[in-house]
């Protein structure tokens, strides 16, 4: 289930499905928001989980009854098929599939409901209890399944595929994915023990504690002011047109995070330590190999991406922030360019600073409609069916995500407060939702795409909405402001995320030698900033009050080495959009085919119809030049035309 993201480790019995769920459940902590009027917030829609799932509350006895039935199904699966998959593979997969569907329903509901009640101890206790029970069931009854499928002799598999080419053949992608893990699997008894013990002795409870405590943090911008959550503070910083206000927000944020460093360091030490031990025990050669295996992408492709971003991407990054620095000096009288100014809006043009929820919906619908009536219809369906939890409420999981919740979903969690970035986030998460809805037909075992394609619809959704708005911009000033905002987003998705990856690499590499102190993690963070943004004075005049920003990036804890996927997807989508811009005829149909394939196609096969090959040596540099470089050139030309730069 989507809820599998909170398990202490990826359950071997459900490893392939769970890995995909971890991908789709991940939250985007970099999302920024802005405070809206309390009256508006009170009327913003909440998701109707009870209506869709059929439970009256997370405490419902119906959930326990469903788990009772699932446990009986799992015991029957083991009794009927353990040791017999050399002849009964089709029946075993079909039975396993039904269990996965049932688990998804009850555990997704509890997990989603708990994400809007992080300050409710009873709700968190209920979720923990159910997941503890789930781990026991999976460890005792399901461990055999993926291990025996992975170990199945090729001749036995070929014989069964020949006997049932259509019925069994439709599961080929799931079978192949499961069998790729074979060289890294441990013995059945060890895998079982790891799964059963996870809720009691694994890293998961520490990571969950980290996330809950992070959601409880509150910040007061000045003495006597009302404390706000981190989402609102970040929004106040990025939306302010006053540099001193932005700098104060950054100081308040960093000071507040200092008191959180020991919790964050404990969790990250647990995650990095577990990752190190598991890599060693399972035989993964590189730090990212475990993640790359689950994403079905070769290590060398990821290494090529990271190398291109650290060279070409960093060059564009420095060039962009030099441009932004000049424009802010001209438009806001900026004297010192600090980290708090990195995401500052360019205050020119006539565009609105804030948007109501209905306005945001109309903007996204219009952008989607212009490109694909099919995707626009799916978006409208999500809105009308109350599948989106909108307001930035206290006690709610930070950032934004879209949960697939197969058979019941999708569902979006937002922290909407009315900024343009919030509109972009709605477009992004709605792309995920549309992707899920299109790919559900592949079945629960194969509907979720590999990480390399998981962000395709979401980032493409952002891009089509952006391009629609850009075409409607009433002036050069509005156009420049929009371009700068979009480049902000791309830099954050590409360069910043690869900078995050570099930080993870430093921490994980050092963790092999022992526990890291919070100061050592802070040092690694500061080193990564210099590597990707330059020394102080090169572009940014100061990195003051940035020392503890590493503590709030939840990706480091929930899904190690996931962050490069944003760069991967953003550059792939940039290339896809280039194909669309050159030849729009027939593009929608090809893209919908890609999205509908879910996990049935790997990234190379999926991108072939568009003439793209991310495994080529020059793909990533070419993508950076075409995607980021073209927008940079347009922004620089407009800035010069308007007199902001020479």
Image (cartoon, rainbow, N blue to C red):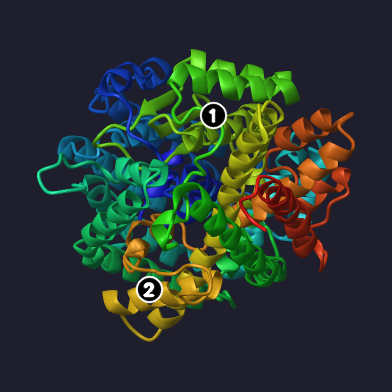
Q: Is residue 48 above or below residue 200?
A: above
Q: Which of 625/451 is in front?
A: 625
- 554 or 74: nearer the viewer: 554
Q: Is residue 13 left or right of residue 127?
A: right
Q: Is residue 517 visible?
A: no
Number of the label disc, if any, that sits on residue 351: 1
Viewer-side label of 2, 1? 1
- In primary-sequence order, the first of circles 2 and 1 is 2
User: Disc 1 on helix, strand or loop?
Assistant: loop
Q: Residue at x 47, y 28 (%)?
A: 411
At x 29%, y 46%, the residue is 230
Where's residue 74, x and y in %? 44, 40
Give the spatial CA distance, label 2 vs label 1: 48 Å
Residue 516 x %, y %? 31, 79
Residue 598 visible here? yes
Res 443 quadrant in image: top right
Q: Measuring from the top left, give residue 410's x and y in whole percent.
A: 51, 28
Q: Name the residue that disc number 2 marks.
A: 273
Quarter of the figure with the C terminus: bottom right
> What is the crowding at mark 1: few (fewer than 14 residues within 10 Å), some, or many (at least 20)?
some
Residue lying at the far left in this picture: please name it. 224
Q: Is residue 298 above or below residue 351?
A: below
Q: In screen coordinates, is 631 left or right of 605?
A: left
For the residue carrying disc 2, how many other residues have a C-alpha within 10 Å: few (<14), some (14-19), or many (20+)?
many
Seen as rendered, the residue at the extreme bottom is 513
Residue 316 placement, left or right of 336: right
């Amino acid at each position: 289930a989507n809820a599998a993201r909170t398990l202490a480790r990826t359950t071997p019995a459900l490893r392939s499905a769970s890995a995909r769920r971890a991908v789709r459940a991940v939250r985007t902590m970099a999302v920024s928001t802005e405070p809206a009027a309390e009256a508006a917030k009170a009327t913003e829609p909440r998701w109707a989980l009870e209506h869709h799932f059929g439970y009256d509350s997370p405490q419902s006895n119906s959930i326990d009854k469903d788990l009772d039935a699932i446990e009986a199904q799992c015991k029957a699966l083991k009794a009927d098929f353990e040791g017999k998959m050399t002849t009964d593979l089709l029946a075993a997969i079909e039975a396993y599939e039904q269990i996965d569907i049932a688990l998804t329903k009850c555990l997704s509901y509890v997990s989603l409901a708990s994400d809007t009640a992080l300050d409710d101890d009873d709700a968190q206790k209920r979720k923990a209890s159910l997941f503890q029970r789930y781990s026991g069931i999976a460890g005792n009854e399901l461990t055999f399944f993926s291990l025996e499928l992975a170990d199945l002799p090729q001749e036995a598999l070929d014989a069964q595929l020949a006997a049932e080419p259509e019925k069994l053949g439709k599961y080929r992608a799931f079978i192949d994915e499961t069998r790729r893990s074979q060289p890294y699997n441990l013995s059945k008894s060890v895998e079982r023990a790891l799964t059963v013990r996870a809720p009691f002795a694994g890293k998961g409870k520490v990571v969950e504690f980290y996330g809950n405590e992070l959601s409880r943090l509150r910040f007061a911008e000045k003495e006597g002011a009302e404390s706000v959550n981190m989402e609102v503070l970040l929004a106040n910083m990025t939306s302010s047109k006053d540099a001193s206000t932005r700098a104060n927000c950054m100081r308040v944020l960093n000071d507040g995070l200092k008191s959180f460093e020991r919790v964050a360091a404990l969790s990250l030490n647990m995650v990095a330590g577990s990752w190190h031990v598991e890599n060693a025990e399972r035989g993964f050669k590189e730090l990212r190999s475990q993640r790359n295996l689950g994403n079905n992408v070769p290590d060398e492709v990821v290494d090529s991406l990271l190398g291109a971003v650290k060279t070409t991407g960093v060059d564009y990054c420095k060039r962009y922030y030099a441009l932004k620095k000049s424009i802010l000096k001209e438009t806001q009288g900026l004297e010192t360019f600090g980290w708090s100014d990195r995401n500052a809006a360019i205050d020119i043009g006539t565009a609105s600073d804030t948007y109501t929820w209905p306005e945001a919906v109309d903007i996204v619908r219009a952008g989607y409609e212009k490109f694909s009536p099919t995707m626009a219809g799916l978006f409208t369906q999500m809105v009308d069916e109350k599948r989106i939890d909108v307001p930035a409420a206290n006690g709610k999981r930070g950032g934004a995500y879209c949960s697939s919740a197969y058979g019941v979903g999708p569902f979006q969690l937002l922290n909407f407060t009315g900024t343009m970035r919030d509109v972009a986030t709605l477009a992004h998460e709605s792309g995920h939702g549309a992707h899920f809805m299109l790919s559900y037909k592949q079945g629960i075992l194969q509907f979720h795409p590999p990480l390399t394609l998981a962000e395709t619809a979401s980032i493409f959704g952002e891009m089509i909405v952006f391009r629609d708005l850009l075409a409607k911009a009433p002036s050069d000033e509005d156009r420049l402001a929009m371009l700068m905002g979009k480049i902000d987003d791309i830099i954050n998705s590409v360069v910043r995320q690869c900078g995050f990856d570099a930080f993870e690499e430093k921490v994980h590499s050092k963790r092999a030698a022992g526990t890291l102190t919070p100061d050592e993690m802070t040092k690694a963070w500061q080193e990564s900033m210099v590597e990707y943004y330059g020394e102080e004075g090169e572009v940014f005049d100061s990195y003051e009050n940035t020392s503890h920003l590493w503590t709030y990036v939840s990706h480091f804890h929930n899904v190690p080495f996931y962050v490069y996927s944003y760069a991967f997807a953003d550059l792939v989508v940039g290339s896809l959009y280039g194909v669309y811009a050159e030849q729009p005829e027939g593009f929608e149909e090809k893209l919908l085919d890609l999205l509908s394939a879910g996990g049935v196609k790997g990234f190379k096969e999926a991108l072939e119809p568009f003439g793209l090959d991310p495994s080529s040596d020059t793909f990533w540099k070419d993508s950076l030049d075409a995607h980021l470089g073209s927008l940079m050139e347009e922004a620089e030309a407009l800035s010069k035309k308007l007199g902001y730069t020479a």
